Amino acid sequence: MPIQIIAPAPFVTADDEADDEGGVRLDFDNDGDIAMDGDAPRRAAGRQSGGIVTPGEVVTEDPQWMRGHGTYLSQPLAPGGSQSIVSSLAGTISKTNKLLSIRALKFRYVPEIGDLVVGRILEVQTKRWRVDIAAPHSATLLLSSINLPGGILRKRTSTDELQIRTFFSEGDLLVAEVQTLSNDGLASLHTRSLKYGKLRNGVFMTIDAGMVRRMKSHVLTMNTSNGGGEVDIYLGVNGYIYIAKHTTPLTESGGPEGKSVSITRLEEEASEAIYSNVNEEISPETRAEIARIACVIGALAKNGVKVDDEMVHLGYEAALEEFLQGMEWGGDGEAGKRVVEAALAKRMEG
Amino acid sequence: MEGLRNDGRRWNELRRIHCQLSTSSTNADGSSYIEQGFTKVLCNVTGPAEPSSRQKVKQDAATVTCEVYFAAFSGTDRIKRGRNDKKVQELQTAIQKTFASVILTHLFSRSEITISIHILSQDGGTLAACINATTLALIDAGIPLKDYVCACTSGQSTSIFDNEGSTPDPWLDVNYLEESDIPSLTVATVGETEKIVALSMENKVRIEMLEGMIAVGISGCAKVKGIMDAEVRRYGKTRLEAATGE
């Protein structure tokens, strides 16, 4: 027995009225006749409108395609019948030769070798740390893959093992690179470069992993206005971000641009100081600019704009102008949206 | 006013559904909010992440855990429900079991997916609203699902027409008053198929009535799926447009 279900009355809110187009959807209310057949055409039409597929939607029944991430094979209707590829995510279809995969709108970070990540120490073990990098599994950082004080080439001794907490202890933030991946996707990190290591003198924030664009360099140094001085931004590919006051000794040699450092120099630099837990003196001006950059990055991510070198700079400029106009500025809501729009307009201008 | 229910709906009419994705900006990987009539539910999903305890580790699949919180002000009487409240635990188990079968857990071995649900207002069909909210939050979190899981309630009015031999129509999507008045059940299906993944009834009803109630519930689920799907597509479209910088 076919049952007809009457759709509920459309939901109208104050800000919804523009979408409603003067009650076009009100015909839903008539006599419930749109009930069952209303869904079938939408399914087909959905593909064109923005190209979104949703879970359970058949992507293709053509056996020539191979299924990739975000899809699964449906049970054949008849034994020996053909299987169709069904989406398991809401997202866009991407085709690589004959491989069909779905890219979700939002997803958790999946580590890849060479990624620069910002992480937080979860646990200290005898010879290694467990680090939260926003991935399905926490990463490991071996004692042998950090710069020990006194030089990179020094042999690791049992004293180092006993003093493991003096390098990193629970809750410490660090910037590292993904060194290896095991078969089941567990990441192992390393900080064997002066670009990497413990983070201090700044603020930590998170955005969605997919919102950081992969770039040549994920450490930016910005010249801020209002006497804020230079500020370092560590854009972790995993969506963890650290914004800190620019520290001189590390960057003069290592530099965010990745100038290579000679091994002898490295030894001098890798002193006890890099594992210090004490913040330097940070002026109120710098703090304000760090906060402003954090607001800009938050607003960019919130409005769906990928965060990269260019957008951070443009967004920061836009935020400064917004600030100079004497507007309220809090990173979210209307001001954030205005800043992002201004930044996008600037990018269009070139 | 013949044939209308106490809130003016027909027997086969759904209450207004309003749903939203990505409602919480921090911490959760996916979040959603749903209103079905005056039943209001907020859902946050975290994961797949490192399991919070060793007991939860499964070698070949992700563990699904569910936490349900009733707001003390959500019902007609102010009741605080603790973690060990029977009703809370029942809901948690129902939701956890439902979604463990639909999430493609084998893709995330040794990890945990946590569903956290806040019930802000109860007006009948709490379990149904929780399941719908969870589906949306999981989609938002980008966790692979076999299909949408949509839930709906239906009740059987024990009317005087019984003795004429024709059973009255079952009522779709019962509200709080109806729920406390007549026997009702919650049914959850996978997508638009008629595959039932959850079925719960707390009252007694004559066996002849059951089939009709389930049938109405399943049709209601299909309708709910359409509404949720439309919202997911709308949300996806706006997100894509933002990403391309339009």
Image: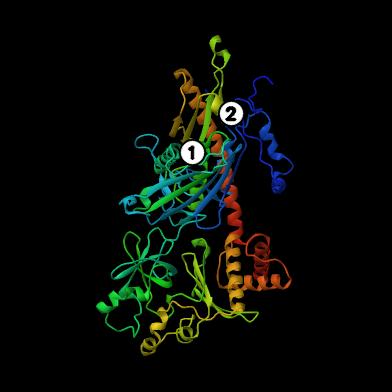
Kind of element beneath mark 2: helix
Give how far across and how far down residue A154 sits, in percent. 29, 84
Relative to A350, B166 lies left or right: left
**Furthest residue to the left?**
A158
What residue would you read off at disc 2? B177
At a point 53% along the width and 34% down the height, the residue shown is B125
What residue would you read off at disc 1? B191
Query: Which mark is in front, 1 or 2?
Result: 2
Give me the C-alpha separation between circle 1 and circle 2. 29 Å
Quarter holding residue B11? top right
Give how far across and how far down residue A26 sits, in percent. 70, 36
Q: Is residue B171 visible?
A: yes
At a point 42% along the width and 51% down the height, the residue shown is B113
Amino acid bearing label 2: Leu
At a point 37% along the width and 59% down the height, the residue shown is A137
Of the two numbered discs 1 and 2 on the same chain, state the one appearing first in sequence: 2
Q: Looking at the image, is A13 positioned above or below residue B173?
A: below
Give how far across and how far down residue A105 sits, in percent. 52, 55
Give how far across and how far down residue B25 sits, in percent. 56, 57
Q: Quadrant of the C terminus of chain A?
A: bottom right
Q: Looking at the image, is A87 positioned above or below residue B188?
A: below
